[in-house]
Amino acid sequence: MAGQASISTEILARYAADAAREVEGVRELADSPLPRRHAVRVSGSDGAMRLELHVVTEWGASIPAVGRKVQERVREYLSSMADIEPLAVEVVVDAVGPERDA
């Protein structure tokens, strides 16, 4: 592998998390209380990498629209930061944040 560098899955997960947090309607990422279950999971290799992001949306946000925007933003971010195009970006909405007081 002379002349090639690799990026750890932890870094790719961090990039994906940063991108998801930028999307309007995402309140936070949802970590699981189960061991080894994080808000962002990366599986596969560069050629067939899959990401799974668990998010909490803002109250009143359109869940399908937020999901699409997260997918788009994660793809754009990974492409620009790591020159990687994931095979799949799956978004799981684990919860909807509480309604904020007016």
Image: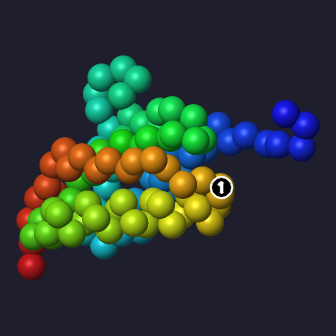
Q: Amino acid at mark 1?
A: Ala
- The quarter holding residue 9 reads top right
The residue sitting at the bottom extreme is 102
Q: Is residue 41 visible?
A: yes
Viewer-side residue, 56 vs 66:
66
Q: Residue sitting at 30 percent across and 23 percent down? A: 34
Viewer-side residue, 22 vs 98:
22
Instruction: Rate crowding at label 1 as few (under 14), some (14 to 19) or many (20 or more) other CA atoms within 10 Å.
Output: some
The quarter of the picture where the N terminus appears is top right
Q: Residue sitting at 32 percent across and 47 percent down? A: 90
Viewer-side residue, 48 vs 102:
48
Q: Residue sitting at 31 percent across and 55 percent down? A: 28
Q: Residue sitting at 65 percent across and 55 percent down? A: 82
Q: Is residue 51 left or right of residue 44?
A: left
Q: Which residue is mark 1?
A: 82
Q: Is residue 7 left or right of residue 10?
A: right
Rendered location of residue 49, percent (x, y): 50, 40
Rendered location of residue 81, percent (x, y): 64, 61
